[in-house]
Amino acid sequence: MNNKWENNIRRVVPYTPGEQPKIKDIIKLNTNENPFPPSPMVTKVIEEFESDRLRIYPDTDSTVLVNALAKRYNVKPSNVFVGVGSDDVLSMAFMTFFNSDKPIVFPDITYSFYDVWADVYRIPYKTFPLDENFRINADDYKCENGGIVIPNPNAPTGVLESTEFFEEIVKANPDSVVIVDEAYIDFGGKSCIELCEKYENLLVVQTFSKSRSMAGMRIGFAIGSEKLIKYMNDVKFSVNSYTMNPLSQYCGAAAVEDEEYFKKTVNEIIAVREYSKEKLTALGFTFPDSYSNFIFASHKSKPAKEIFEALKERKIFVRYWNKDRINNHLRITIGTREQMDKMFKALEEILK
Ligand SMILES: *Cc1c(COP(=O)(O)O)cnc(C)c1O
């Protein structure tokens, strides 16, 4: 039943985001959102924002936000690119940097948006399997390629690699752009940002969605050499120059400037994560050690799918993929201590 005009359509199988259930009183541990509200400084900006400001177009350069990020990460504003969530930043980076006939490369188990962008932009790609402990083999990435993208910590495994590991990969690939997607780096990892000074072809991408509690505001950013950032901005300004609205720009800057709140909430999540590791182990789960705000766990006797459904019946949402190699794992976002305790209680019943 194909009409002729449909032959010229750019067809894609879209990315499937985690469920955002409409029902009330749920415990939502399925999309790695932060259980704490954004910084009170963000609330203040929202309360004081004058709607008349919406009459005019936003600052295309997002100057307040770019400057705040440059200051926080000790780089120049010309080293910072901002976008509407890191999905926007990554999508722009794919479009800008991955134009080779050679395949781009990334792990087989990873953020499931990479193959979607590759498809939509018609970028050939190849994946390398993680080993049985979900570790990435750096040697795999010393191959001919049209670009590299790897999350650190990896998602949905939570496994962290060192900056030395990434330096080794970047060093071996002077002919392509290497993207490190650091969506979860603030939960205990060391950022590759410091390597950007040394390697012109390294782009580090981060987001406000996880560690800064602002998934709904859609702010992401990249740090890289002046050259990389300029190339990205040229593409961005050729697609849509007014991407980020002024409220987001000001709220983003306020969040970055409130370092104390950031540290406090991130440390609380890390503490609850470490506590959750003990509880899950006691319940018979195994998991790779997580340096993120989630744990990727498998139970020794009960199939993940059954646990997933049983939790859902109790209005506790975690993430499950019916995908090869990971179909016996659950990705559990770290919530508040109270939310986690409710989940552990439910798990005790389910596993009895
Ligand atoms: C959450 C996430 C992102 C995207 O987050 P945004 O909300 O678009 O900033 C990117 N990469 C990974 C690995 C993620 O988990």
Image: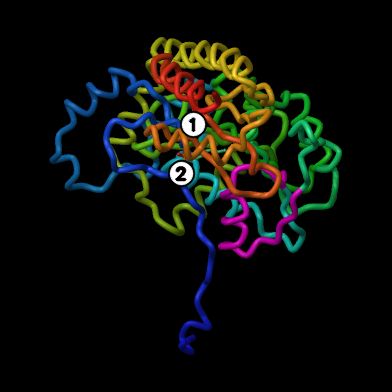
- Residue 73 % position (x, y): 53, 22
**Whether residue 224 can be seen here:** no
55 and 299: which is toward the camera: 299
283 and 128: which is toward the camera: 283
Q: Residues within 10 Å of mark 2 (few under 14, many from 20)?
A: few
Disc 2 is placed on an element classified as: loop
Q: Which mark is residue 310?
A: none
- Residue 156 % position (x, y): 60, 36
Q: Residue at x 76, y 32 (%)?
A: 135
Quarter of the image containing the C terminus? top right
Instruction: Give the amino acid at mark 2.
Output: Gly
- Kindly indicate the quadrant of the structure image that contains residue 60: top left
Residue 125, magenta (yes or no):
yes
In this figure, which residue is indicated by the disc labeled 1? 77
Q: Is mark 1 within 8 Å of ligand 1?
A: no
Residue 244, magenta (yes or no):
no
Q: Earlier in the sequence, mark 1 or mark 2?
A: 2
- Residue 12 % position (x, y): 53, 65
Residue range in magenta is 106-127
Q: Residue at x 52, y 10 (%)?
A: 271
Disc 1 is placed on an element classified as: helix
Q: Is mark 2 within 8 Å of ligand 1?
A: no
- Kindly indicate the quadrant of the structure image that contains residue 58: top left
In this figure, which residue is indicated by the disc labeled 2? 18
197 and 291: which is toward the camera: 291
Q: How many marks?
A: 2
Nearest to viewer (mark 1 / mark 2)? 2
Q: Residue at x 50, y 48 (%)?
A: 233
Query: Is 328 positioned to the left or the right of 265 in the image?
Result: right
Tell whether label 2 touches label 1 (CB within 8 Å).
no
- Residue 5 % position (x, y): 46, 86
* Image vertical order of residue 174 relative to residue 261, above or below: below
